[in-house]
Amino acid sequence: MKGLILAAGIGNRLYPVTKKIPKCLIKVGKKRILEHILDGFDYAGIKEVIIIVGFNKEKVKEKIGTSYRGLNICYGVNDFFKSTNNLYSLWCAKEFIDGPFIQCHGDIIPNREIIKKVLDSPLEDAVVIDSNPKNMVEDANRVKMQNGKIIDINKILLLNESAGRAFGIYKFSKQSAIDYYKHIEQNVYKHLNAGFEIGLRPLLKEKNFQPLDINGYPFAEIDTISDLKEARKKIKSILEYDKKF
């Protein structure tokens, strides 16, 4: 199982914090967002991680290098980060994806038990969700269930239609990874500024994706200055929380 972190974006809504560094290198607590994610992968037992970089890519490579706490780090590069979205960043990882993987967005800080729960889960295809309605925000993906499986993901589902908030962690089996990239290839050049959802939605209808609910475990998703301030307030509780499911 490999880890894939999408971290190519500029982070315009975090300006001027992101004037000279990409969002993934913003410091929250004693470490940067990307380091918090890598700590989670290391704790879960993943050995190889691909990071897709773009904006100020050399600063990411300089900070993280090719080895982090024993993790083997590889880089894919989205040179068109100004005019594309994370669908294209996923396409930039195609040469590295040859089996099951965990997709993680580079603007989240999950409690380390979350990623371990994903890796240890018997579910081969899963969307990590938080079913707590108190953690639902307007600009967040939500998942729709039908007949016991996830069939859609978007930001417009009504709360009473949604099983929970999808905040940026997805698990793919080997076959689903192959099919995911088929959908990405079909769409990436037609929709250069599209998000990853355009590749995931048809896959959800074809495969048996299940929700992996982490309700109770804390995390931060950092898109705006207010998100950043909140994450810095609660970073200690995010990292130290140790409740067992």
Image (spheres, grey):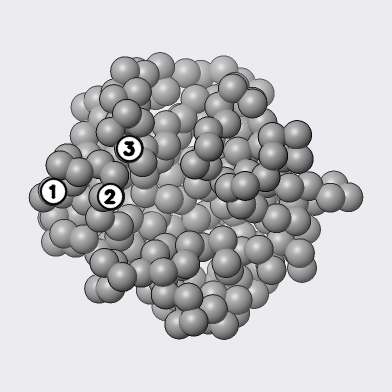
Given the image, on which type of amino acid does mark 2 rest?
A: Gly
Tag of residue 19: 1
Spot occupied by residue 58 in the image (x, y as percentages of width and height): 14, 61
Would you identify the image quadrant in which residue 14 lies?
top left
* C-alpha span from label 2 to label 3: 8 Å
The residue indicated by pointer 2 is 11
Q: Residue at x 64, y 75 (%)?
A: 179
**Nearer-N-terminus badge (1/2):** 2
Spot occupied by residue 1 in the image (x, y as percentages of width and height): 53, 58
Closest to the observer, 243 or 192: 192
Answer whether labels 2 and 3 touch (C-beta < 8 Å): no
Tag of residue 224: 3
Q: Would residue 184 appear left or right of 18 to someone viewing this image?
A: right
Spot occupied by residue 82 in the image (x, y as percentages of width and height): 26, 67
Would you identify the image quadrant in which residue 165 lies?
top right
Mark 2: which secondary structure? loop
